[in-house]
Image (tube, rainbow, N blue to C red):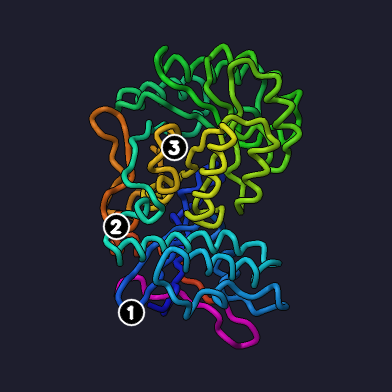
Amino acid sequence: MKIESVDLFYLAMPEVRDIGDGSQDMLLVRVRTADYTGWGECEASPLTSIASFVCPMSHSACHPVHYSVIGQDIEKPDDIARITANVRANSLDLLQSDHTLSGIEMALWDLLGKRFEQPVYNLLGFRHAELKSPYASVLFGDTPDDTLRKASDIRRQGFTALKFGWGPFGRSTLADDADQLHAAREGVGDDGVLLVDAGTAWVDDVEAAALRLPALEDARVLFLEEPFVAGALRSYRELAARCNGLRIAGGEGSHNAYVAEHFIDHSGAGYVQIDTGRIGGIGDAKRVADYARKRNVQFVNHTFTSHLALSASLQPFAGVASDWLCEYPTEPAPLAVALTRDRVAVDRNGFVAPPEAPGLGMELNLKAILKYVQDVEITVNGKTLYSTPELVQ
């Protein structure tokens, strides 16, 4: 089989608000051979990523992504690794290429899974999928009362683990942050698992983050995610050394496996969180999951968008019982909800697993997302490099 086409679709809500919610727009990827279609989703700026796919070559290490993908043979998983390596070699200086590659790579796994009539996790070498404990992933409320209501509502839905992130946390006073944490703990209950995402609020300031440690530990938070920006590894390690029971998490900013492995080796974190829509796809995420286990760091998926992305994020550690936590977005925008007819369902005992259907196991609802398609044309010197393809054919 040869890759005959790669189509990119920029989808967005009518209004994209200035909040930490990545489900408000997306770059949807469709890859086709003569007989099969695969779907993927990039966790990236859609328009920027489209540009990286079609842009004119700048020099030999700055080819557009399509140069290394269109027309390539796709018969087996090794072909995905080969295409990935070619993209990275030919687009070395095109920094957006890893994000664009992620959605394409994801779609290639979906396509191969459909061809071989197996879920992706089987193609990765797992005989079966282990159940995971989903943590409902939501934004902090504007006030502690809002956070308490959110936590109580989510607990009533059956979730036993909950992560609050972004919003006002870390960007207000120490007392305000403590009030948010106490409200979250009250809502999730004494027996619930509570996680916190600081959304890089303190950049690299260890002292500002350390001031919150007593309140975090008093609220019995399991891990504090992204207290600092992705590359501030010295700050991560210094904060981790000051924690008593609380663990540090991060790694979602990794755009290739090397960056993630450096995070594992040098941050002191107990959890590494990898987004298949950002790191380069499912293959690189699997590599990181394998590496993390050797270093006694727990692997956790990162995802905050659709159930297509959620399914993809579960594949790299699907067969590993010791990596028991998984992020489960519970407040996605209507666009992300509309994308798929299928869902990664929470079972009656509160667990999830990736679909057993071939590929990523997600049927897209193309008619439902037509209203979100953005009409885009990229023209250079009179030549059209990209125009929005037909989504439903």
**Depicted 374 relative to depicted 296: above or below:** below
Image coords of residue 115 (percent x, y): 30, 67
- Inspect the image, locate mark 2, and give the three-letter code of the amino acid beneath it: Gln
From the viewer's perspective, is the residue at label 1 or at label 3 nearer? Answer: 1
Image coords of residue 348 (percent x, y): 23, 30
Q: Give the CA separation, mark 1 to mark 3.
A: 35 Å
Nearer the observer, 176 or 300: 300
User: Image quadrant of residue 106?
Assistant: bottom left
Residue under the image location 32 percent in, 47 percent down: 127
From the viewer's perspective, is the residue at label 2 or at label 1 nearer? Answer: 2
- Inspect the image, locate mark 3, and give the three-letter code of the amino acid beneath it: Glu
Secondary structure category for the residue under label 2: loop
Residue 344, magenta (yes or no): no
Name the quarter where the C terminus is drawn.
bottom left
> Sequence-wise, which precedes: disc 2 or disc 1?
1
Residue 383, magenta (yes or no): yes
Whether residue 334 appears in this view of the structure is: no
User: Which mark, residue 315?
Assistant: none
Using a 10 Å C-alpha cutoff, classify the residue at mark 2 as few (fewer than 14 neighbours), some (14 to 19) or many (20 or more): some
> Sequence-wise, which precedes: disc 3 or disc 2?
2
On the image, numbered disc 1 is attached to which residue?
34
Q: Give the CA separation, mark 3 to mark 2.
A: 24 Å
Image coords of residue 102 (percent x, y): 52, 59
Q: Give the CA separation, mark 2 to mark 1.
A: 19 Å
> Sequence-wise, which precedes: disc 1 or disc 3?
1
- Inspect the image, locate mark 1, and give the three-letter code of the amino acid beneath it: Ala
Using a 10 Å C-alpha cutoff, classify the residue at mark 3 as few (fewer than 14 neighbours), some (14 to 19) or many (20 or more): many
Specify start and end residues of the magenta stretch as a single range.
378-393
